[in-house]
């Protein structure tokens, strides 16, 4: 093989290509996602050191009074060891990914995607990107239904930089709700973070009270109109349904109004 072709392959011209096909595009945190990686050899044989699959999303971080969007790696999977891919050879490699229970939901402006790449020495690594839809699992869905029953409307979902709260991730996914019925006159908004803990679900609530009178306006100016509440709802309670959970959340939130 000529040196010229090897140089072309090293910059990605005439080299191997990769295409990933997913079994389905919708999954919940804690579930598995299957698929097949199709590899098509280029104009010369190449040593593939590994095939890797990333689960990625993006988050926002405030820097110098502006918001900057960053890409975050949720999980990384190595699906094969090194092998020699011959010129023109076609291979299909099946895989199964375990979606972490802390994976963010792909709601509103929070995309999540699977990115596949070939690790090739001395060459540009070919990659492929596929969007997926991560939907709420049963526990989070139950609490979301409970908040809906209480008249909270989901206004915004965002991935915000918060490494201390995010655990293995540099961000947390924040759900911002506005009251429409029960707490309409008492709250400005309710912010919720969902943290799955096995069969249980931990919630971080930021309860933003509406200013009332002089004292309320003073508290608002001093930043005292917000309460931060941390609560864990056991799986046994979640399995009783959204109406039971709605009653419990109503009692909890009412203490801070």
Image (cartoon, helix red, strand yellow):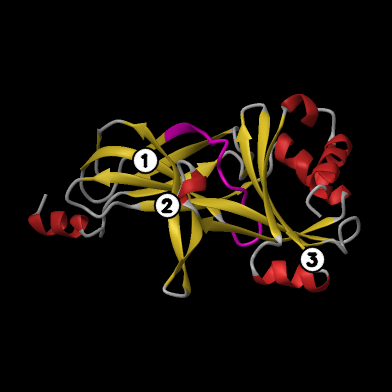
Q: Residue at x 59, y 33 (%)?
A: 30
Nearest to the observer: residue 246 or residue 81 = 246
Nearest to the observer: residue 221 or residue 154 = 221
Nearest to the observer: residue 223 or residue 104 = 223
Q: Position of residue 162 (x, y in %)?
A: 49, 53
Q: Position of residue 38 (x, y in %)?
A: 42, 42
Q: Predominant secondary structure in magenta?
A: loop
| Badge number at residue 67 | none
Q: Circle 2 is placed at which residue position?
A: 128
Q: Is residue 99 left or right of residue 202?
A: left
Question: Would you call the spot at circle 2 few (<14 residues within 10 Å), some (14-19), or many (20 or more)?
Answer: some
Span shown in magenta = 93-110
Q: Position of residue 180 (x, y in %)?
A: 87, 61
Q: Residue furthest left?
A: 3
Q: Is residue 214 left or right of residue 230?
A: right
Question: Would you call the spot at circle 3 few (<14 residues within 10 Å), some (14-19), or many (20 or more)?
Answer: many
N-terminal of the pair, mark 1 or mark 2, is: 1
Q: Circle 3 is placed at which residue position?
A: 210
Q: CA distance from mark 1 to mark 3?
A: 49 Å
Q: Secondary structure at mark 3?
A: loop
| Badge number at residue 52 | 1
């Amino acid at each position: 093989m000529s040196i010229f072709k090897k140089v072309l392959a090293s910059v990605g011209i005439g080299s191997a290509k990769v295409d990933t096909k997913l079994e389905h595009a919708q999954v919940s945190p804690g579930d598995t996602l299957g698929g097949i990686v199709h590899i098509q050899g280029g104009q010369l044989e190449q040593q593939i050191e590994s095939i890797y699959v990333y689960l990625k999303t993006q988050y926002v971080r405030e820097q110098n009074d502006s918001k900057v969007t960053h890409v975050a790696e949720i999980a990384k999977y190595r699906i094969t060891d090194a092998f020699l891919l011959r010129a023109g050879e076609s291979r299909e490699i099946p895989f199964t990914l375990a979606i972490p229970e802390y994976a963010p939901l792909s709601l509103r402006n929070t995309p999540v995607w699977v990115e596949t790449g070939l690790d090739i020495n001395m060459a540009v690594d070919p990659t492929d990107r596929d969007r997926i839809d991560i939907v709420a699992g049963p526990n989070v869905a139950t609490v979301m239904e409970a908040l809906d029953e209480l008249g909270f409307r989901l206004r915004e979902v965002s991935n915000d930089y918060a490494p201390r709260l995010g655990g293995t991730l540099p961000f947390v996914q924040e759900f911002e709700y506005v009251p429409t019925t029960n707490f309409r006159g008492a709250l400005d908004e309710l912010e919720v973070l969902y943290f799955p803990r096995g069969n249980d679900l931990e919630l971080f609530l930021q309860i933003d009270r509406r200013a009332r009178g002089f004292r309320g306006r003073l508290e608002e100016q001093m930043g005292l109109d917000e309460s931060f509440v941390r609560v864990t709802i056991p799986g046994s309670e979640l399995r009783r349904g959204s109406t039971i959970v709605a009653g419990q959340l109503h009692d909890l939130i009412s203490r801070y109004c």
